[in-house]
Image (cartoon, helix red, strand yellow):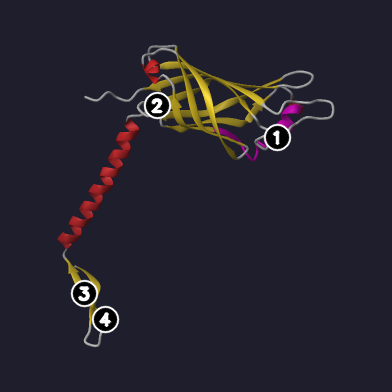
Amino acid sequence: MLLIPRRRASARGLSSPTTTHYSPITLFRAAARICALVALILASIHATRAQDTVVNFDPTATQVTFTLAATLHTVHGGFKLKTGQMHFDPATGKAGGVVILDATSANTDNSSRDQKMHGEILESAKFPEITFIPTQVTGPLADLFARKSAQLQVAGIFRLHGQDHPMTIPVAVSPIAANGQFQAETKFDVPYVKWGLKNPSTFVLRVGDTVNLEIHSTVQISRPAAKN
């Protein structure tokens, strides 16, 4: 039996400890109520997630390329997709998940240029990942669920070189198979110099301060289970 001290007033106005007795049945009932509350909270979280539409990216069927304008020519390169999954609520568009590019995989087919890019600009040994965390999806989601092409806007946080930047990315989605596979494509500019990265220009070669990024990926879209 648990004994819990309680203060009781004495004849001199001072307080002295007393003891309140709680039976095992009372303690058991209190513990049961706490467990029921925790179970209810966890069930509500699970129910919310169960209503989300899930989008899985296939790294083996994803092409990530970038272009950088220069005075003598345009630099072309690419990244590898490390992993990608996002989810969103079809009713509200509220989204979550993460898409991760492998910064260490950046390649322009020029070893000296790539060495400088990794060592002085991306600093990929220190910042090995470039991530995008979606927070909101807007657009004709009904067309998407009807297996029609759709133009969506995905807002989120783009993390580059250890810094977070709010960004909204346009995404074109088209169905390519009856099993929920879609082709997702996006193209957008990254103002890397404005975001604090070094501009690789030299006295002879001048390059732009914005890099264009393109992503073409096969994605699997899973809708929430229909309610009975």
Sequence-wise, which precedes: disc 1 or disc 3? 3
Based on the picture, tell me whether residue 128 belongs to the magenta stretch.
Answer: yes
> Which residue is at a point 35% across and 33% down the rendered structure image?
49
Sequence-wise, which precedes: disc 2 or disc 3? 3
Label 1 – label 3 distance at C-alpha: 68 Å
Tag 3 residue: 19
Q: Who is closer to the viewer here, 226 or 106? A: 226
Across the whole image, how many numbered discs are drawn on residues? Answer: 4
Looking at the rendered structure, the kind of residue marked 2 is: Val
> Which residue is at a point 42% across and 16% down the rendered structure image?
181
Label 2 – label 3 distance at C-alpha: 56 Å
Based on the picture, tell me whether residue 72 belongs to the magenta stretch.
Answer: no
Tag 4 residue: 15
Looking at the rendered structure, the kind of residue marked 3 is: Thr
**Which mark's residue is nearer the viewer, 4 or 1?**
4
Tag 1 residue: 121
* Disc 4 residue crowd, few under 14, some 14–19, many 20+, Cα 10 Å: few
